[in-house]
Image: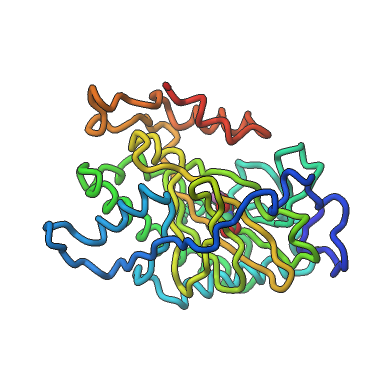
Amino acid sequence: MELVSNLPVYQTVPEKYIFPPDKRPANDIVNHSINLPVIDLRGGRIDSDGQDEIIRDIMKAGKEFGFFQVINHGISTKTIDNMLQVCENFFKMPAQEKERYYSDDMSRAFFLNSSTQYDKSQTRYWRDYLRIACYPIEEFVDQWPEKPENFREILSEYTLRVREIASKILKLIAEGLGLHKDYFAGDLSKGNIKMEVNFYPPCPDPSLTMGLLPHCDRQLITVLAQGTAATGLQAKYKQKWINVKPIPSAFVVNFGHQLEIVTNGILKSVEHRALTNSTVARTSIATMTMPTMDCLIAPAKELVNENNPPMYKEFIFRDFIKAYDAALANREGVLEFFKLY
Ligand code: OGA
Ligand code: NI
């Protein structure tokens, strides 16, 4: 296993990390004049139409961008910073310490990897990652590493807090859609919580490499912490990319395929990608709330009628994951398979 975090400091990008020209960052236009909406979750004012302003703002941002940032969400800066720091410390451990965690076995509760899917790993992302099964904590904690110091404690605390934010946002979204506020609180969000911790070391030439190629998240909802070291995440907006600017202690929220399906396309899972930078290491933590494997996924009955027919098939979440895992290089086409039109 070759980790980017184990590479010596290079002056030029090693060949196998260089993407073909059509996959490089500069191939698409970046719109620098648009920023994602930032929603203050402490608000709670009611506007002149009698609507809760937070719900209104979330729905507006959700429909327009499929992405937004939240501040004043109730998680302390210390909890977020501790988590980002302990993850960065993990990647900075000596190669021998990390070696035992190398794997790509999705059934493991914790593994470390560095690869790409799109051309069977011939070109490598400038990215290492941890994939962690986080919740229920008791089920997985013994399989998490004991190093760096306090890793388990910090991860447990962070998992619980982020789970609260995800639930809170899902409630607001349910209300915004006119559904019962607990619409998502059952099997739709009661599966495991998975974390993907991304580490992008400084890269000698970011124009040749990719941190993550364009993709959509496939779960219900993603809550991402990205620290403030550097800008790297970009979201698709009207055929162009926009930078998701780091805001201290904010979380970036975006929707997965399952939320798009359940809302019958009202809230979309939007493409995003991660670029590298030449000056600092960037760590990001994506926490994904998932349905249970046996959960029936379908457009909410309340959101479909004669004028808005269901746009997606009904299926069991497990079957979606199977299709996704089998698709490998064509993962971005999986949602198409579940569309009716
Ligand atoms: C992801 C992801 C973006 C980032 O892990 O799915 O999109 O900023 N990460 O690292
Ligand atoms: Ni993603």
Quadrant (top left/top right/bottom left/bottom right) for the C terminus: top left
Does residue 196 show up? Answer: no
Q: Does residue 219 appear in the picture of this structure?
A: yes
Residue 44 point in image, percent of width and height: 21, 66
Tell me: 129 left or right of 250: right
* Left or right of residue 240: residue 112: right
> Seen in the image, is 107 located left or right of residue 23?
left
Residue 43: % across, % down: 25, 69
Residue 194 placed where, x, y %?
51, 50
Q: Is 122 located above or below residue 36 in the figure?
A: above
Using the image, determine if residue 231 lies above or below residue 27: below
Q: Which of the 4 quarters of the picture holds residue 71?
A: bottom left
Q: How many callouts does the rendering have?
A: 0
Q: Residue 41 appears in which quarter of the rendering?
A: bottom left
- Residue sitting at x 27%, y 70%: 42
Nearer to the camera, 55 or 166 = 55
- Residue drawn at the location 78% of the way across and 48% of the way down: 19
**312 vs 142, nearest the viewer:** 312
Please state if 164 lies on the left or on the right of 113 as rendered.
left
Front one among 18 and 93:
18
Towards the viewer: 323 or 172: 172
Colour style of the rendered protein structure: rainbow
